[in-house]
Image: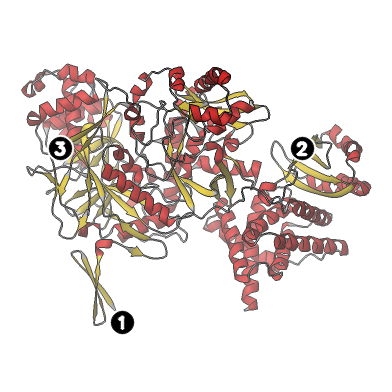
């Protein structure tokens, strides 16, 4: 048996023995255990205003017109200048003109009329024709977004005319106030007003846009109350608690058009479009794209946002596995905030945007280097010698991050080579969303992309986020409604069923942050159909939503050599077959290229220096999409480079590959440097639905027990290593002495605001509460005096019904009592960690024998928990080796022989564990097992409980696998 692969055009022939099998590559479908990658048949591409072969004398009038839109001030300087007069202008003016013209030829990033977008249907074909575009640009003109600040109207008149009102849904109650997010002069703040039942009812009535008259009917406003009610609404509008239908919306129908705002003579926001008349991308060029994506997915480490990881840790510490309101979770007092944004002032934000960016980039580079550094070796970097990824042997990840359902490859085509600028994203709509304002076909295409994502994850609610604060850059955020749902933050909402901030619940399940809509009882996943750089925002709720898009998703598939190996003088091209992932780069230092202070650098000197350095004939300088392109043989370009270098200490020059035959031409045959947005998609489910929570519990139980009620709750602050002594000493003595007064009890260890024990007592007689408090205080008095106990507090007990449910909470509390009694009996013998792990394994074995779970499912469940803790602790190969070595010692160690009292407590604890699990609904048993075992480990160990839980599950998994193997 043998096979031979022969690629012929768009077909692949496999010769297997004597059989010939023919596969069409047009679908570009690669199937394996990781993915099924497809290339979407519709593409968007962008072209600069002029052909890269254009001469300024033939384009001068058009260039001036483009400049007039983007820079009115500079246009006034050059509006009367003729093309042949340009060389006589001051050098700075000439250089600025050169930069504008350079942009208009080489840069395809949309900006006024300096570049255009085009939609290409049936974009991929074998033996493709050149793509033919219209030279003429169609200008889609909108009022410039900053002009929204000039829209003036009388709120009183709007209310009198029965306008629509919409609530700022960021409001939430505290004990005596109502808090909400507001924005003043571009700065977000957490505003607060005194709690008012009537105001809250108005807000609830306006959670969907409602007319003033309908609102009055809903609120039961009488005729003599009409004017005072309108005054209240006006005040609420001024406080940003309400929005009118004349307030801006950034998603949906254009705001200015919607309110009928006159646009005479106002500055414009232009989106330029060129129609693609014919042609396609050559299919053969794309044949290696799927296998490239597969490789990148398996070799690039998934870099979780540091802010997201910190939030998860802080959330778990404060709320454990509770589900809480998103607004409460982000409250700086009642919750945990996000990324320290709540503590930052304006100057902090300014500095942080640079320091955070550098920190993220450095971390990304370090992670890439740790993964790829052994295979990609800088010692092998040779001038003019490309590195081919397909010729290197990488260590592939066994559990790569999931690919998003849709994402993009930003690329250009140079003859037989694909030149990739960027690969990834969380949705292919991220790059195309802005064009939906200009073209209905792009809008429809974007909705089809959203449909792919939704069909793959039917039980998840995808939603776009409407956000605006930076008037100067918010044009990029203007887009049509693409996803079925949207969440508007501090702006009016034109969608049929607006999502609400105060409807969103948040929890942490394993390593994932889960959002859920209370109203719709569905998991929520944000999808920003915008290329806006959201790290610019200082609004914590927006930053969290944007970061969540990347959670456990391979959204960045780029390999930046300069991030892996920073500050080198040369970087070679990086290829994968015919795909160029990055071009060659050369570092040029100002001190090396410029002569002494009093001498001028000549064109010849500059050209010679660059030639000796090995710089390509065509190259570019700059960052991201703010680049300038230079031709080594062109005097004007070299002169411009010299001027550019004057303000730089050091600069990287990057190779530019110009095609001999451009795939995109206009009606006159003029070639353009087009940049394609190639949309890739895969249809696997990547988001599991949230465990559905009933909107109303079937059993109503008391949630809070303040001091003086049947539950007595103490917090005893002491060093974590003294807590065991406290439990088996003072607390045990107290419990035995007052056994007749205590119906049930349990303890938990906590480290929030300092290490402490939480002791909760269920009393037979509420009247004994004061006596018990006095007794325990007296027992602790000596330790308080010498500082062994730093504080002793009595608190309100808030039941964890969100985690355990109203139906189970009482039984869980009883189980916690059995757990606590068992643990105290063990602590008296001072068992070591191995013994505690083994006893956990014994409990798990009892549960397995009770046949609550199928044996195979039980093993899978333990593996799931173990993997989650391993990931949380970022274990690497060295760590696993240490764990395996310790496991052998654990296995060989003698088991602890339990005393009769300990054995009795073990049986009661095990039986209670099984009984609670049996009482729970089958679909909740797995999470309940995790919760109860988590609390047991918390009680067993006095410090590093999560790490002990990680080790415990690792050993338990091996025990379970060994038992199953022996049983078979």
Snapshot quadrant of residue 837: bottom right
Task: Count neighbours of disc 3 (C-alpha within 10 A) and say few if under 14, some if 14 to 19, many if 20 or more.
Answer: many
Residue 668 drawn above or below residue 19: above
- As rendered, which of 892 and 960 lies closer to the eye? 960
Of label 3 and label 1, which has the lower sequence position? Answer: 1
Q: Residues within 10 Å of mark 1 (few under 14, many from 20)?
A: few
The C terminus sits in image quarter: bottom right
Task: Give the distance between the C-alpha atoms of the residues marked 1 and 2, in whole angstroms.
Answer: 74 Å
Q: Is residue 954 left or right of residue 682?
A: right
Mark number displayed over residue 847: none
Where in the figure is residue 366, as x and y percent of width and height? 44, 45
Determine if residue 297 is in view.
yes
User: From the viewer's perspective, is 337 left or right of 441?
Assistant: right
Determine the residue positioned at 29% across, 39% down. Answer: 435
Say if 40 sits above or below 171 in the image: below
The residue under label 2 is: 796
Instruction: Count numbered badges in the picture.
Output: 3
User: Which of disc 3 and disc 2 is earlier in sequence?
Assistant: 3
Q: Which residue is mark 1?
A: 1
* Crowd rating for badge 2 (residues with CA inside 10 Å; few <14, some 14–19, many 20+): some
Query: x, y (%) of residue 798?
Result: 73, 41
Does the rendering let one see residue 374? no
Give residue 819's quadrant in the image. Answer: bottom right
């Amino acid at each position: 048996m043998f096979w031979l692969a022969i690629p012929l055009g768009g077909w692949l022939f496999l010769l297997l023995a004597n059989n010939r099998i023919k596969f069409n590559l047009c679908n570009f479908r690669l199937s394996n255990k990781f993915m099924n990658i497809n290339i979407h048949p519709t593409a968007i591409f962008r072209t600069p205003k002029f052909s890269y072969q254009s001469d300024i004398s033939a384009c001068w009038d058009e260039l001036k017109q483009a400049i007039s839109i983007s820079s009115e001030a500079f246009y006034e300087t050059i509006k009367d200048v003729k093309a042949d007069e340009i060389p006589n202008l001051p050098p700075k003016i000439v250089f600025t003109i050169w930069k504008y013209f350079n942009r208009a030829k080489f840069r395809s990033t949309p900006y006024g009329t300096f570049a255009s977008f085009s939609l290409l249907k049936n974009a991929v074909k074998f033996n493709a024709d050149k793509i033919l575009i219209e030279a003429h640009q169609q200008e889609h003109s909108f009022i410039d977004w900053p002009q929204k600040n000039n829209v003036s109207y009388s709120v009183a008149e709007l209310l009198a005319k029965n306008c629509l009102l919409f609530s700022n849904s960021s409001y939430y109650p505290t004990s005596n106030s109502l808090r909400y997010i507001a924005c003043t002069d571009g700065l977000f703040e957490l505003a607060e007003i005194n709690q008012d039942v009537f105001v809250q009812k108005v807000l609830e009535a306006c959670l969907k846009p409602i007319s003033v008259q309908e609102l009055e009917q809903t609120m039961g406003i009488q005729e003599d109350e009409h004017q005072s009610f309108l005054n209240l609404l006006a005040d609420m509008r001024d406080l940003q608690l309400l929005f009118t239908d004349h307030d801006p919306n950034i998603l949906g129908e254009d705001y200015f058009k919607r309110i009928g705002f006159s646009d005479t003579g106002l500055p414009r926001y232009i989106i330029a479009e060129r129609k693609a008349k014919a042609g396609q991308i050559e299919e053969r060029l794309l044949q290696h794209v799927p296998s490239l994506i597969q490789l990148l997915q398996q070799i690039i480490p998934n870099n979780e946002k540091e802010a997201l990881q910190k939030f998860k840790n802080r959330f778990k510490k404060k709320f454990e596995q509770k589900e809480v309101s998103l607004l409460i979770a982000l409250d700086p007092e009642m919750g945990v905030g996000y990324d320290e944004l709540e503590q930052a002032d304006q100057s902090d934000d300014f500095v942080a945007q640079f320091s955070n960016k550098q920190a993220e980039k450095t971390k990304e580079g370090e992670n890439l280097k740790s993964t790829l550094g052994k295979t990609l070796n800088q010692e092998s970097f040779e001038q003019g010698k490309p590195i081919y990824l397909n010729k290197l042997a990488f260590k592939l990840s066994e559990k790569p991050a999931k690919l998003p359902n849709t994402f993009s490859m930003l690329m250009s085509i140079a003859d037989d080579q694909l030149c990739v600028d960027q690969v990834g994203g969380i949705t292919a709509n991220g790059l195309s969303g802005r064009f939906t304002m200009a073209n209905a076909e792009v809008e429809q295409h974007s909705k089809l992309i959203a449909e792919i994502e939704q069909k793959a994850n039917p039980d998840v609610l995808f939603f776009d986020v409407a956000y605006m604060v930076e008037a100067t850059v918010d044009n990029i955020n203007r887009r049509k409604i693409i996803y079925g749902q949207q969440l508007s933050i501090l702006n009016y909402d034109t969608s049929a069923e607006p999502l609400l901030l105060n409807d969103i619940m948040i929890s942490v399940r394993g390593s994932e942050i889960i959002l859920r809509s209370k109203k719709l009882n569905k998991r929520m996943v944000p999808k920003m159909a915008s290329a806006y750089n959201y790290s610019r925002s200082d609004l914590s709720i927006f930053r969290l939503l944007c970061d969540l898009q990347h959670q456990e998703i391979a959204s960045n598939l780029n390999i930046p050599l300069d991030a892996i190996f920073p500050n080198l003088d040369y970087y070679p091209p990086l290829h994968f077959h015919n795909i160029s992932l990055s071009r060659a780069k050369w570092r040029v230092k100002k001190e090396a290229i410029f002569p002494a202070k009093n001498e001028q650098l000549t064109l010849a000197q500059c050209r010679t220096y660059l030639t000796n350095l090995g710089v390509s004939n065509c190259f570019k300088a700059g960052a991201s999409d703010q680049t300038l392109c230079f031709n080594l043989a062109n005097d004007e370009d070299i002169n411009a480079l010299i001027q550019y270098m004057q303000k730089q200490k050091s600069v990287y020059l990057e190779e530019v590959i110009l095609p001999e035959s451009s795939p995109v031409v206009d009606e006159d045959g003029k070639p353009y440097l087009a940049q394609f947005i190639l949309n890739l998609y895969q249809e696997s489910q990547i988001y599991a639905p949230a465990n559905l929570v009933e909107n109303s519990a079937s059993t109503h139980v008391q949630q809070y027990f303040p001091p003086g009620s049947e539950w007595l709750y103490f917090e005893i602050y002491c060093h974590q290593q003294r807590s065991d002594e406290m439990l088996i000493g003072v607390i045990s003595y107290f419990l035995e002495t007052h056994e007749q007064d205590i119906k049930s009890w349990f303890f938990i260890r906590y480290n929030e605001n300092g290490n402490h024990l939480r002791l909760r007592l269920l009393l037979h007689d509420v009247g004994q509460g004061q006596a018990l408090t006095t007794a325990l205080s007296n027992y602790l008095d000596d330790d308080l005096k010498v500082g062994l106990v730093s504080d002793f507090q009595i608190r309100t007990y808030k039941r964890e019904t969100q985690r355990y449910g109203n139906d189970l909470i009482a039984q869980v509390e009883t189980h916690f009592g059995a757990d606590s009694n068992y643990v105290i009996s063990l602590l008296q013998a001072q068992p070591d960690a191995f013994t505690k792990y083994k006893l956990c394994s014994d409990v798990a074995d009892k549960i397995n024998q009770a046949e609550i779970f199928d044996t195979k499912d039980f093993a899978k469940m333990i593996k799931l928990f173990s993997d989650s803790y391993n990931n949380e602790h970022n274990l690497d190969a060295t760590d696993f080796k240490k764990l395996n070595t310790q496991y052998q010692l654990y296995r060989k160690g003698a088991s602890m022989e339990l005393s009769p009292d300990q054995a009795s407590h073990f049986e009661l604890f095990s039986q209670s564990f099984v009984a609670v699990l049996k009482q729970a609904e089958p679909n909740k048993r797995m999470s309940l097992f995790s919760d109860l075992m988590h609390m047991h480990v918390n009680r067993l160990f006095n410090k590093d409980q999560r790490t002990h839980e990680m080790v415990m599950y690792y050993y338990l998994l091996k025990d379970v696998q060994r038992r199953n193997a022996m049983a078979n």
